[in-house]
Amino acid sequence: MTGYLIRRSMQMVVVLLLSSLAIFFLLNFAPGGPLSGMRLVADPKQRASADDIKRMEEMLGLDKPLQIQYVSWLTGDDWLKTVNSEWEGERRGVLRGDFGNSWKKHSPVSEMILDALPNTIMLLLTSTILSMLVAIPIGIYSAVKQYSRADYAFTFFTFVGTAIPAFWFGLMLILLLGYMFKSWGLPYFPTGGVESLRAARPGSLLELLGAQPGTLLDRSVYLVMPTIVLSLLYMAGWGRFVRSSMLEVLRQDYVRTARAKGLAEQIVVVKHAMRNALIPLVTIVTFQIAGIFGGAILTETVFSYPGMGRLYITALNGSDWPVVQAYLIILAVLVVLATLASDILYTVVDPRIRF
Amino acid sequence: MSVAELTFGSEELARPDEDSQLKLIWRRFRRHRLAVIGLGIAAFLILGSFVGPLLTPYKSTEIPASQYGASRSLGPLSTAPDGFHVLGTDRNGRDYMTRLMEGGRVSLALAFIVVIVSEIVGAVIGGVSGYFGGWVDSLIMRVVDFLLTLPTLPLLLVLYTLIPPQNVPGGSVTVLAIVLILFGWMGAARLVRGSVLSLKNQEFTEASRAVGASDKRIILRHMLPNSLAPVIVSATLGVGGVVVTEAALSYIGFGVKPPAPSWGNMLQGVQTEMFDDPFRVFYPGMAIFLVSLSFNFIGDALRDALDPRLKM
């Protein structure tokens, strides 16, 4: 196992290096260079001239050789004077947590990420927990009562959950819980954002709960709708997974033995079958974390939720490449870590698998 | 097995007509009631999207001059449903029903093209991988596994921004199709590789090789038809997924660009005006949802109907 871990860690480093190369050079794939968009602006007064672009490229360090740009982006350029004094700068590099400055916002990318990341992590946590809380009981129940009405209803629900466009579902929720509720005089939900900026409006759910702006209660009310929307897909998928893994376990010999011993069905299901059926779910959930992180882009857009996804979309729209690169690097790290974690969990939960 | 089924079996043996296979599949397909309903809904929406735009007197992308004359203002031109506009007009005064049908045409055509091309690409790559084996196989499968671990949405977005639509014939629709195909072929590759691997060692392959058939003939005449069923199923299931992805990307502005309508971009920026007319949000999303759900049911039923192990 130790040898396996060492080998895997080395592979991880290589994979991350390769992805950092790919991510860095992405912006240079755009024909005409990273600033080419500025030449295409429709309004001639806004359009940058060739001289302007040259000056901007100098300011952003885009005139240096590509490989030097990459090295200074990854490892910083404060040490480069030992090689060539012209390349010296003040960046500390991605490896030391410095993603450079945003081209649009005039603030360090790492600060923007520190603002956005906690919001997204919060959303990821609540959605993962909600998905599991719904998927596990439903999956187990429909496996135990296979081909019952409830099982069919649940199967239908999983089809709906996978087929429905999540962002549209979010819009419908806003319409129902935010707008319709308001017009019907019911306590309505806030339709976007992450916390209140001023005292709650009369008639809203926030006022009913007496939530003060910025408190935990206030924030959790804002989280309700995004959490439901983000977890819908995973509820359906994981529920389906629990059902089939439970069905498989229920067919095992030891379950039959437990029943033959005369144990109550409830104990057989909960103590013998459920534990073994849920083990594989852990690896699936871990593996999909990066996918949920990426999927949050849509949810965050619908609910104007200031997380990583919104940051990414805004950066892409504005050709703010340092932010885009930072997002993709974080994503790559997340993918690599999630894959490793799920592989390790695999061996932990199933001792028959060895590396 | 009941007596009725037994007699049916002998009948079939007696006159093995060409389409008996299809009849068999259709009979098994019909057992999945939801899939039959789904087939009806999908047929209705497809027909509406491809035939509907031919029947309407309105243009989907042109803002009618008369609208400006009537309202004498440059404010939003949306009107409520009336005798002329079945679903009213949108904020630019364009007939909403026309845009809905035209948008369906764009969304569905894109989905069909993306699915067909990615299944073909995947089938070819998977077939090559499984048939030749060795280092080719392990290289291709490594790439497939790698691509499958990537979260697609952020990468679709960044690739979309990297290809400037004005340089590509067909514009944003083509860019979107290319990007979706790039991430869409891996499933089919895996399926085809799997079935080719199992077919490779079966007697009929060995027999055809023994009588001197070429690689090309074996692949085209023996492997391909035998590994078609799972590809058809995954293609059917794929249509729903692509329609939803297209809609999501167009909704956040990384898909089909206006003025050309698509079910996704009709929802773009709808949040500002949806409280005035909730149905503006409802119709395109419902269409996406119904198409996706229908194709999922159809795929599910096809899987049962085409599965050779259930044929007895």
Image: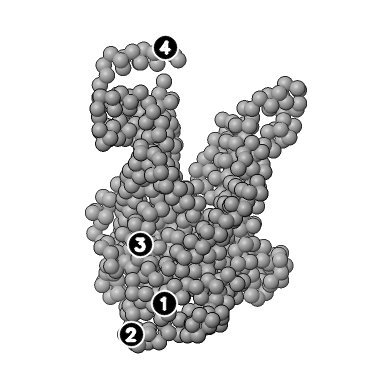
Q: Percent from the top left, x then y, of residue A141?
A: 64, 36
Callouts 3 and 1 in the same chain: no
Sort mark 3 into few (<14), some (14-19) or many (20+) by Cα contacts within 10 Å: many
Could you tell me if the residues under marks 4 and 2 are in contact, i.e. CB atoms within 8 Å? no
Q: CA distance from mark 3 to mark 1?
A: 36 Å
Residue B275 seen anywhere in this rendered image of the structure: no
Residue picked out by circle 2: A50
Residue picked out by circle 1: A65
Callouts 1 and 2 in the same chain: yes
Mark 3 or 4, which is nearer the eye? 3
Q: CA distance from mark 3 to mark 4?
A: 56 Å
Callouts 4 and 1 in the same chain: no
Q: What chain letter is assigned to the residue under label 2? A: A
Describe the element under mark 3 as helix, strand or loop.
Answer: loop
Label 2 is placed on what type of residue? Ala
Point out which mark residue B256 bears. 3
Identify the residue at horizontal 65%, vertical 46% (top origin): A1
Q: CA distance from mark 4 to mark 2?
A: 84 Å
Callouts 3 and 2 in the same chain: no
Give the left or right position of residue B133, taking residue A184 as reference.
left
Sort mark 4 into few (<14), some (14-19) or many (20+) by Cα contacts within 10 Å: few
Identify the residue at horizontal 66%, vertical 66% (top origin): A219
Q: Percent from the top left, x then y, of residue B255?
A: 38, 62
